[in-house]
Image: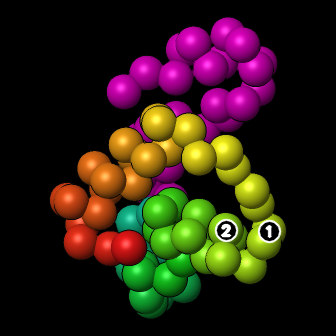
Amino acid sequence: MSFAHLQHRIPGACSTTLKEGVQEIADLLATRQVTDTDEPQYDNHRGLVDAFATGKVRAPRTPACRRYRSEYTAVWGQS
């Protein structure tokens, strides 16, 4: 995965390398600072579902959003 386009469009957006990010996650799990990876704060889809449910974010019901939800729930079985 490359974030080169994002880095070009938003300088400074990608300050952590993939290797550093993976190491950070491994360290958090090893030190038990994160014990339940299913919590919404660690799961992009669940976090968005919760944010929508509580009115923290609103998004148009675009075809791309519906397709993403359909694909994600087909793979992960979550609503």
Query: Is 29 positioned to the left or the right of 5 in the image?
Result: left
| Position of residue 59 measured from the top left corner of the image (x, y, whole percent) | 69, 50
Image quadrant holding the N terminus, namely top left
Q: Residue at x 59, y 64 (%)?
A: 48
In the rendered image, the vertical position of residue 66 relative to residue 24, given as above or below: above
In the rendered image, the vertical position of residue 53 relative to residue 71, given as above or below: below
Q: Tell me the magenta residue range.
A: 1-24
Q: Residue at x 52, y 23 (%)?
A: 3
Q: Which three-letter amino acid code belongs to the residue tagged 1?
A: Lys
Which residue in the protein does label 1 denote? 56
Q: Residue at x 24, y 66 (%)?
A: 76
Which residue in the protein does label 2 denote? 52
Q: Which three-letter amino acid code belongs to the residue tagged 2?
A: Phe
Q: Are marks 1 and 2 in contact (CB under 8 Å)?
A: yes
In the rendered image, the vertical position of residue 29 relative to residue 24, given as above or below: below
For marks 1 and 2, give the CA distance. Answer: 6 Å
Query: Is residue 3 highlighted in magenta?
Result: yes
